[in-house]
């Protein structure tokens, strides 16, 4: 999606969607020099897709205007799209023939690029299952070619988890190939790939060269986030942790990667600052809150114990609803609605989100708007932002320009709570 969002979503009520294995993948792009209504449309669409549960890549580009052609975003999004395999599409006869080659006694030779091109052509979990076996081969050359193949296709998280184990392979060539391939997958938001690179980066007992490779891989993975929207704060947190170490190549590499994340200013001593305003820890807190979007409201739940007895108070109902949403959406909605009806403002915002997304209840924008306005009246900026867009565009509700303008002004006045 290039500077656009989406309003219609399939409702999930009794049974949650399996977003990882049978739902669409989404790549959203926003040019920060685009039309103003594109900025607001996309920036309210992202948290909705995020709250719904889609596997979502979201990019913001500082110098991109309202153009479909922008090499930096086009190159990455097209490379991603061409590597995807339809999750519900059965193997064709030709694809089955390509995979069958790898069950024979003599394996096909890698392509001139050093990878198994036929497996990249098939892609997805079927080819991923083959690659997992090849990664365990006793032949180093086979393991290298299998790891290299992950740079040319997307094979599912189970296969990437197997690749991650090769980052500690006994062969240096296998290790380095695996780390480079993990960088590609981490860029496209593979959790096992990101976790593996974070673990390698923060492991101070690791060989310095291996850590340097890991830091470089993280740098590659965050290159399209560092000056835009930092969607994966955990990777940045790992890089920031390296800055606290003694001087050396690993720290220098992390510093170079992060230097694009802020605009240097002159200090009182006349030197250029090497930290964002407020320091790196505050910056991590800010980007973490921003990436979480509406789900940040559930942070209050981490401080609550799991043991509850008697009648649940509104906050407990809200947290119980959050726990249930990905197990039983209808039950999650019921608990969240009860909390909202008892006056819990984050729950009111979330009920609006659940109605808008059709999560636990049938999609209903009129109800979404009602609850968002109620939460906005109580001071919830997230709800005000979504309600302003809803009544401006009139999607599923009558357009109310004055209400939209009032809510939009409230969001602008409280912009520090929603840093961009």
Image: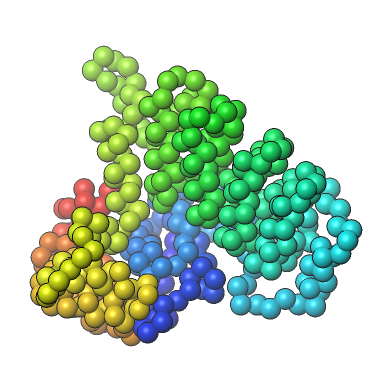
Q: Residue furthest top?
A: 269
Residue 317, x across and y down, in percent:
19, 72
Residue 270 falls left or right of residue 405: right
Task: Tell me which residue sits at (27%, 20%) in the image.
Answer: 267
Identify the image quadrant of residue 46: bottom left
Count of numbered circles in the view: 0
Q: Is residue 388 visible?
A: no
Residue 299, x across and y down, in percent:
25, 56
Task: Tell me which residue sits at (33%, 24%) in the image.
Answer: 273
Task: Tell me which residue sits at (16%, 53%) in the image.
Answer: 413
* Observer-nearest of 327 and 109: 327
* Observer-nearest of 257 and 193: 193
Q: How is the image coloured?
A: rainbow
Residue 214, x across and y down, in percent:
55, 37
Compared to residue 127, the image places residue 414 above or below, namely: above
Task: Tell me which residue sits at (34%, 21%) in the image.
Answer: 272
Residue 123, x across and y down, in percent:
69, 64
Identify the image quadrant of residue 144: top right
* Observer-nearest of 107 and 413: 107
* Observer-nearest of 62 and 240: 240
Residue 269 falls left or right of residue 214: left
Q: Is residue 119 visible?
A: yes
Compared to residue 167, the image places residue 98 above or below, namely: below
């Amino acid at each position: 999606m290039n500077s656009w969002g989406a309003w219609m979503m399939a409702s999930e009520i009794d049974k949650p969607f399996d977003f990882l294995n049978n739902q669409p993948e989404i790549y959203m792009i926003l040019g920060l020099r685009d039309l103003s209504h594109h900025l607001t449309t996309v920036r309210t669409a992202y948290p909705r897709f995020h709250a719904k549960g889609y596997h979502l890549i979201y990019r913001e580009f500082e110098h991109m205007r309202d153009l479909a052609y922008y090499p930096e975003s086009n190159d990455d999004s097209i490379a991603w799209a061409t590597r995807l395999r339809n999750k519900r599409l059965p193997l064709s006869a030709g694809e089955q023939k390509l995979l069958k080659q790898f069950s024979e006694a003599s394996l096909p030779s890698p392509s001139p690029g050093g990878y198994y091109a036929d497996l990249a052509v098939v892609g997805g979990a079927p080819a991923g299952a083959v690659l997992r076996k090849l990664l365990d081969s006793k032949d180093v050359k086979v393991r290298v070619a299998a790891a290299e193949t992950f740079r040319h296709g997307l094979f599912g998280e189970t296969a990437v988890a197997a690749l991650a184990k090769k980052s500690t392979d006994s062969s240096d060539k296998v290790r380095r190939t695996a780390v480079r391939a993990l960088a590609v997958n981490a860029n496209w938001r593979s959790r096992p790939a990101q976790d593996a690179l974070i673990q390698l980066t923060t492991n101070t007992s690791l060989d310095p060269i291996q850590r340097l490779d890991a830091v470089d891989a993280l740098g590659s993975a965050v290159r399209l986030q560092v000056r835009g929207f930092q969607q994966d704060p955990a990777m940045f947190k790992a890089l920031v942790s390296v800055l606290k170490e003694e001087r050396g190549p690993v720290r220098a590499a992390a510093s170079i990667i992060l230097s694009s994340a802020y605009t240097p200013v002159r200090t009182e001593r006349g030197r250029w600052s090497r930290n964002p305003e407020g320091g790196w820890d505050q910056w991590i807190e800010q980007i973490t809150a921003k990436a979480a979007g509406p789900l940040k409201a559930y942070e209050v739940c981490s401080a609550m114990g799991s043991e509850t007895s008697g009648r649940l108070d509104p906050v407990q109902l809200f947290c119980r609803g959050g726990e249930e949403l990905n197990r039983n959406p209808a039950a999650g909605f019921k608990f969240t609605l009860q909390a909202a009806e008892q006056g819990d403002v984050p729950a009111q915002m979330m009920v609006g989100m659940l109605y808008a997304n059709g999560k636990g209840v049938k999609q209903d924008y009129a109800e979404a708007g009602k609850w968002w306005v109620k939460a906005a009246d109580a001071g919830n900026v997230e709800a005000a932002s979504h309600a302003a867009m809803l009544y401006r565009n009139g999607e599923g509700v009558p357009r109310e320009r004055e209400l939209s303008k009032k809510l939009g002004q409230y969001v602008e006045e409280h912009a520090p709570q929603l840093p961009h």
